[in-house]
Amino acid sequence: MSLESDIEDLWHRYDDGDLSADAAGRQELDRLDAFLDALETGEVRAAEKRDGEWESNEWVKQGILLNFGLREIAGREYGDVTYHDVLPLRETGDLPERGTRNTPDGTVLRRGAYVGADCIMMSPSFVNIGAHVGDGTLVDSCDTVGSCAQIGADVKLGANTLIGGVLEPVEDAPVVVEDGASLGAGCRVTSGFVVGENSVVAENTLLTPRIPVYDLVEEEVVYGRLPPERRAFTRFVESSVGDHDLFEGGAYKPAVVAMDVEETTLEGVEREEALRE
């Protein structure tokens, strides 16, 4: 049987109430360990791009959920701290052979996270289970890459950036930041939003499907995605509640404005290759 069919079989047993953490034996846990290994090597991913659209792999998310449902909480050591979780942290001995480095103290990779070659992880930062971080990407200080998030190659996540996670419902697509994108410090990307490749996002921008993106290039308003090769920043537009008596002077809501990427903008986010030698 394939890994996918094994996970689907375990999921049906678990979902039907025929399998629990108490009943899970060595055979079931071995399959879950093999599944986590496949995530860490990039053999499987929580979402993939098909025919130009990002789609979640439902069975992969089921496998991640099984690793919570079929395991017991245990005390584990990280540095001088004992923490309690169902999963250990990911082993990082394979990182230097691929040119990837993580700095002390507090670069945390949870089991089942993939980090590519020539990446830089600054502390403190956290990459959750099911996340996929592509080659050459910078995860800066105080960044969180949530469960199942798909981060492309040569991406820059500025300091204090939050990439939201998603595990439920299992069919929902996770946050995606495509190749070559650069997110300024303090950005927030949530709820399955897709940042198009080679886009540059200004500091403290919130990207979520509930906030409209005013694309001045195509002259349209879009939701849930930032088109490729855009320069995006936050502005405020009039809100429909502005007519209420309590809002003297009007009320406004956040929006995102997207424009063509200018040469000066690209120069400002240019990669420093010396950091990756």
Image: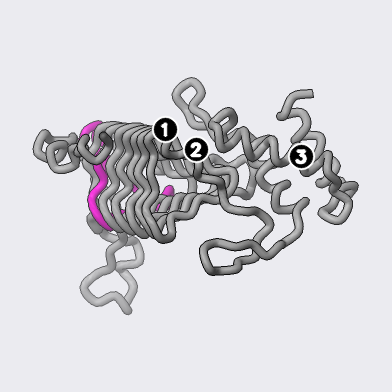
Residues 208 and 74: in front is 74
Residue at the farthest left position: 264
Disc 3 element? helix
Q: How far apart in space, not on screen, are marks 2 and 3 (Cα)? A: 21 Å
Give the residue drawn at x 24%, y 54%. 203
Which disc is residue 94 wearing?
2
Looking at numbered disc 3 in the image, what kind of residue is underneath it?
Asp
Q: Position of residue 253 (x, y in %)?
A: 31, 61
Q: Position of residue 169 (x, y in %)?
A: 64, 47
Count of numbered tags: 3
Please tell me how crowded label 2 is: few (under 14), some (14-19), or many (20+) other residues with Cα within 10 Å.
few
Q: How far apart in space, not on screen, are marks 3 and 1 (Cα)? A: 27 Å
If the image is split into quadrants, where does the C terminus sit? top left
User: Dividing the picture into quarters, in which one does residue 160 lie?
Assistant: bottom left
In this view, 172 is above or below 254: above
Which disc is residue 98 wearing?
1
Image marks 2 and 3: residues in contact by CB distance under 8 Å: no
Disc 2 element? loop
**First in residue order: circle 2 vs circle 3:** 3
Looking at numbered disc 1 in the image, what kind of residue is underneath it?
Arg
Image marks 1 and 2: residues in contact by CB distance under 8 Å: yes
* 3 or 1: mark nearer the eye: 1
**First in residue order: circle 3 vs circle 1:** 3
Residues 34 and 228: in front is 34
Which disc is residue 30 wearing?
3
Boundaries of the magenta span: 200-219
